[in-house]
Image (cartoon, rainbow, N blue to C red):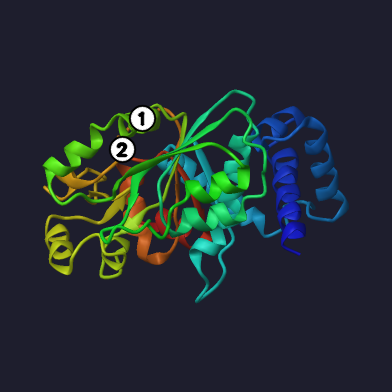
Amino acid sequence: MSNELTLQDEAARAGWLYYVAGMTQDQIAAELGVSRQRAQRLVARASAEGLIQIRLVHRIGACLELERALTERYHLTRCRVAPGLGPGGDPARAIATAAAAELERVLRMETPQVIAFGTGRALRAMAEQLTHTDPGRHRIVSLLGNIAPDGSATLYDVISRIAEKLNATYYPMPVPVISDTPEEREFFMHLRPVRTVFNLARQADITFVGVGQMGPDAPLALDGFVTPDVLRELQELGAVGEICSWVYDAQGRYIDTPRNALVGGVRVEPGQSKPVISVAAGSAKVTAIRAALTGRIVNGLVTDEPTATALLASS
């Protein structure tokens, strides 16, 4: 059932691009990352199943309109909007399939790519939906340390799950997510294996990150990476979101705080020309996502309809 819905969504998207956007089948193939023959079959399916009349009647139509509006508003390089799951639905689950499809598009590229990943619940859900099994010549690398404060592996590690599905070599960042002191972080980051991974991550061709909010339910607090007192201090400094544990304000500017100086990993720098795709949704994350888009920390987005609508309604 899930695979059938995914195929129908893809057919609806292809039909939209052909009948509404006026794209050729070659252009559709390039946009969706499929062969020309598959693009042709998808367009035919959209027509045969009645997804296309005078306008698109499949529910993906509203998503495509939101994608176009978000792309124009925030000057995005990539944007995918998935239907919401309704009140009480899990936003991470809602966007997991769309995020996996975006990653699979990248994995089908013939040119070798360095693909970097953050961590988090949404990216973990994306990894679970991944069906592509050929890593090709791509390399996958972590942006962030994988050791929790108690010495255990972090719960929402992503690249190990992706590497398992792809049977691929991967490059974890073997350091604590948050060091105890700047000196400790400096020691870890100067170890030769860590420098190798760090430099590879900085050269990433495509980056996928989650977005964390900084309210009472902040993932950093729930997962034990900041104490309640530190969370309050960050909030008082104007923190609204975090990407790979680096905290930023409402304008998408990283906050100059000693706590940020303890993060083990690569900071995603604003204004990159290469794709930096955030995979995030939910009403609690709207402010954090908007700030990341405004500050150009990210230039791509996979989200759901309610979040997309809220982002467009905001000033």
Out of 231 and 180, give the one closest to the viewer: 180
Query: Label 2 crowding class (10 Å Cα cut-off): few <14, some 14-19, many 20+?
Result: many
Q: Residues within 10 Å of mark 1 (few under 14, many from 20)?
A: some
Figure check: 176 above or below 222: above
Q: Do we see residue 239 in this rendering? A: yes
99 to the left or right of 192: right
- Residue 126 — which label? none
Which element is circle 2 on?
A: loop
Question: Of all residues shown, which one is farthest toward the right?
Answer: 48
Q: Position of residue 311 (x, y in %)?
A: 41, 55
x, y percent for residue 88: 50, 76
Which residue is the site of mark 1?
Answer: 202
Front residue of 52/97: it is 97
Q: Amino acid at mark 2?
A: Val
Residue under label 2: 266
Residue found at x 30% / y 29%: 192
Q: Return the disc, 2 or 1, that comes first in the chain's sequence.
A: 1
Which percent across, then down, holds residue 313?
40, 57
Nearer to the camera, 137 or 30: 137
Foreground of the two, 147 or 222: 147
Residue at 32% from the left image edge and 34% from the top image edge: 194
What is the spatial separation of the Cα atoms under label 2 and label 1, in whole angstroms? Answer: 7 Å
Q: Quadrant of the N terminus?
A: bottom right
Residue 65 visible somewhere in the drawing: no
Q: Is residue 260 left or right of residue 129?
A: left
For residue 181, side relative to residue 314 (left or right): left
Residue that lies at the very extreme toward the top in this rendered image? 111
Residue 27, horizontal then vertical, whole percent: 70, 29
Looking at the rendered structure, the secondary structure element under dot 1 is: helix
The amino acid sitting under disc 1 is: Arg
Whether the residues at callouts 2 and 1 have beta carbons within 8 Å, the answer is yes
